[in-house]
């Protein structure tokens, strides 16, 4: 399995608005399942219904887009990984925004979906460019930290540690964490509370 | 860079090492799981052929999908039944302690862990639920995580994290009558914004928090996440120790003395360095109500819905959206807003002292005509304690419904839901669009005593008039 994420190319989709919470991304009724299957249909479902086809996720020009361009504090609220799962199942492979809520960001990293940031002016330009030309080719490059739409190029940012996990294909931390089980036990043994009370290992 | 804070000390003690990515591998002392965010994690574990590394450090309960009227099994809702069965199976197969319905200790995960004494100072805690920040009330560092990270904790008892900055939020002085912990945190979020805490752990300090009981501190830390902070905490003190002593999982005998010594040592140093400090005066905080669609859109009960020009430019877009969605107009007084439903409960305000404060308002009064008002204890133990004190009778005589424990209408993954455009006064933590089970339903957040006041008056009212 190739897991390096160095560039994401395709088409953009703008979603304007600050503080878009995970309840809006996927309402709680879609959480009533023991798998993540089928969440794509529920992405932004209440907003889409209210906007009667005018939501970007419904507009024909953005069908097949894979790079979501959002504004400030995107993904705030609930820790539900169902939110990025829903977006990913709709087809999104990368996000660019002014800022992301931390748990949402962490969930995206754990799924191999980069969330990059840019200043408010740049994000607005990107949203305007995509809206004006939805068919334009968009490329997000994690090696050069640039986003390109046609002739337009802008800088994007992501924490260096996170960037390196995408580029090297090590964003799925589970394997590394499990590999250090011996050191984990050493750390646990040094913590006084691990030896207290009924939760002590039998 | 912060130095000498409880956050720094706990972080350093739990650091296993630095991963190639530069992220810290952090040991998690207590892992709490529930039925919504864990089944996919166990499935991922099975796919990878991994085992639970420290099953004795994971504790489970069922809360989100639990019906609060009839809890007979199988549940009427097949999907809910399937979720609880998945949790039962996963706990059994992996030797995980599970507080199921009827165990006497089931309830909202953030209510039961403290009351069992599982939550202790100096611990790192993780749970697949954003309100895990609640446990910070004990001086624990507690993170809400997603399902892939639930898998990571099950498999390795660790998380890959980058260190947070620490902001000290000091509130000093005594709260005025009718002003509660909920008002304090709504005031802080209103002032610092819903993204103000991104990148930070919030340390709640100052004489106001020192005077609070543990339930009040939990209310404040619960909503740290609503201010964008990944976690919030209060340094442990005698109030913390008095609460913990004698609880099921609290250290006993000589371990207790050792524990207190260690807990004292992990408090923030008097000369600790913070990345930021913000100071509030308790006297300036009034009973607070949200009018919009984020927890940051709050105002004093005697204030009016803000005009767009009173807001920062960056907050106007969502304010416009909130006016439309909530059907409230700029300049409209929030007091007097008619209410349909009143909900007392949730991991924010479903604890015994919350119910006591609400019962004081309800006692000898009656819910206004046409209002649906209900009280949902946060756990089986809270319910039992409340009934022993006769709180259930006070509520029922006042016209409130008295329910079984669960998350209820906070996020409405169970039969408790708003219908259509109904507007609710809620003691929960989120007023997001569609949060309480109707895609057009509306939520006003406030303290339990203010919810009880709204139930009796039939409209948003000032609790101080009923004290």
Image (cartoon, grey):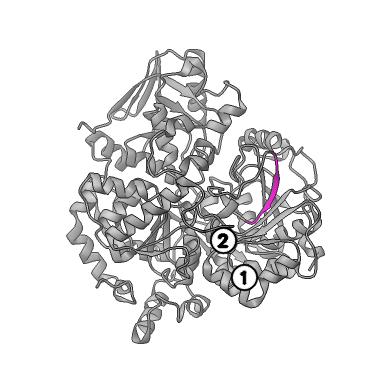
The subunit carrying tag 2 is: B
What residue is at 72 percent from the left and 40 percent from the top? B310
Q: Are marks 1 and 2 on the same chain?
A: yes
Number of residues whose C-alpha sits closer than 10 Å to that of mark 1, classed few (under 14), some (14–19) or many (20 or more): some
Q: Quadrant of the C terminus of chain B?
A: bottom right
Q: Which residues are magenta?
A: B421-427
Q: Is residue B248 magenta?
A: no
The subunit carrying tag 1 is: B
Name the residue carrying label 2.
Answer: B220
Q: Position of residue B400 (x, y in %)?
A: 71, 61
Q: Is residue A144 left or right of residue B139?
A: left
Q: Position of residue B182 (x, y in %)?
A: 63, 60
What residue is at 53 percent from the left and 45 percent from the top? B195
Q: Is residue B115 left or right of residue B309?
A: left
Name the residue carrying label 1.
Answer: B353
What residue is at 59 percent from the left and 43 percent from the top? B437
């Amino acid at each position: 399995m190739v897991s390096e994420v160095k560039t994401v190319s395709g088409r953009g989709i703008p979603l304007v608005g600050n503080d878009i919470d995970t309840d809006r991304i996927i309402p709680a009724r879609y959480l009533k399942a023991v798998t993540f299957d089928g969440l794509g249909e529920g992405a932004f479902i209440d907003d889409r219904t209210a906007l009667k086809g005018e939501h970007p996720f419904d507009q024909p020009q953005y069908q097949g887009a894979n790079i979501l361009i959002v504004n400030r504090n995107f993904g705030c609220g609930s820790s539900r990984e169902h939110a990025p799962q829903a977006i990913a199942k709709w087809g999104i492979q990368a996000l660019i925004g002014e800022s992301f809520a931390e748990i949402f960001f962490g969930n995206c990293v754990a799924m191999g979906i980069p969330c990059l940031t840019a200043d408010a002016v740049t994000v607005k330009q990107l949203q305007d460019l995509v809206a004006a030309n939805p068919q334009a080719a968009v490329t997000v490059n994690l090696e050069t930290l640039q986003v390109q739409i046609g002739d337009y190029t802008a800088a994007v940012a992501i924490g260096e540690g996170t960037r390196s996990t995408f580029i090297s294909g090590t964003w799925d931390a589970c394997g590394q964490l499990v590999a250090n089980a011996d050191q984990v036990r050493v750390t646990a043994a040094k913590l006084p509370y691990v030896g207290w009370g009924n939760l002590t290992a039998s | 860079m912060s130095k000498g804070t409880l956050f720094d000390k706990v972080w350093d003690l739990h650091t296993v090492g630095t991963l190639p990515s530069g992220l810290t591998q952090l040991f998690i002392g207590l892992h709490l799981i529930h039925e919504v965010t864990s089944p996919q994690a166990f499935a991922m574990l099975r796919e990878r052929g991994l085992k639970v590394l420290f099953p004795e450090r994971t504790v489970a309960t069922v809360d989100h999908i639990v019906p609060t009227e009839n809890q007979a099994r199988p549940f009427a809702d097949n999907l809910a039944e399937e979720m609880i069965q998945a949790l039962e199976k996963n706990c059994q197969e992996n030797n995980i302690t599970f507080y199921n319905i009827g165990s006497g200790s089931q309830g909202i995960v953030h209510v039961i862990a403290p009351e069992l004494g599982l939550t202790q100072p100096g611990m790192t805690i993780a749970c697949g639920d954003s309100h895990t920040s609640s446990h910070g009330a004990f001086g624990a560092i507690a993170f809400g995580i997603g399902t892939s990270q639930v898998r990571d904790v099950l498999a390795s008892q660790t998380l890959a994290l980058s260190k947070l900055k620490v902001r000290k939020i000091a509130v000093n002085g005594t709260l005025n009558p009718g002003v509660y912990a909920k008002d304090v945190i709504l005031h802080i979020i209103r002032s610092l914004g819903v993204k103000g805490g991104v990148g930070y752990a919030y340390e709640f300090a100052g004489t106001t928090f020192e005077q609070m009981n543990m339930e009040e501190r939990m209310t404040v830390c619960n909503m740290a996440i609503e201010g964008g902070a990944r976690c919030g905490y209060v340094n442990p003190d005698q109030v913390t120790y008095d609460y913990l002593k004698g609880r099921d999982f609290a250290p006993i005998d000589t371990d207790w003395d050792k524990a207190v010594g260690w807990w004292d040592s992990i408090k923030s140093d008097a000369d600790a360095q913070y990345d930021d400090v913000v100071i509030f005066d308790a006297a300036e905080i009034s009973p607070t109500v949200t009018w919009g669609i984020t927890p940051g859109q709050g105002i004093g009960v005697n204030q009016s819905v803000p005009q767009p020009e009173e807001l920062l430019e960056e907050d106007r877009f969502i304010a416009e959206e909130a006016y439309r969605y909530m059907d409230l107009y700029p300049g409209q007084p929030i007091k007097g807003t008619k209410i349909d439903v009143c909900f007392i409960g949730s991991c924010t305000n479903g604890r015994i002292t919350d119910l006591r404060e609400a019962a004081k308002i309800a006692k000898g009064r009656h819910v206004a005509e046409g209002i649906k008002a209900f009280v949902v204890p946060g756990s089986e133990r809270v319910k039992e304690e409340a009934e022993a004190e006769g709180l259930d009778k006070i509520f029922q005589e006042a016209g409130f419904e008295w329910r079984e424990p669960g998350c209820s209408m906070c996020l409405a993954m169970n039969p408790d839901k708003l219908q259509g455009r109904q507007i609710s006064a809620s003691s929960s933590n989120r007023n997001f669009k569609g949060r309480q089970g109707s895609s057009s339903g509306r939520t006003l957040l406030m303290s339990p005593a203010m919810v009880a006041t709204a139930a009796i008056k039939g409209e948003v009212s000032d609790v101080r008039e009923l004290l």
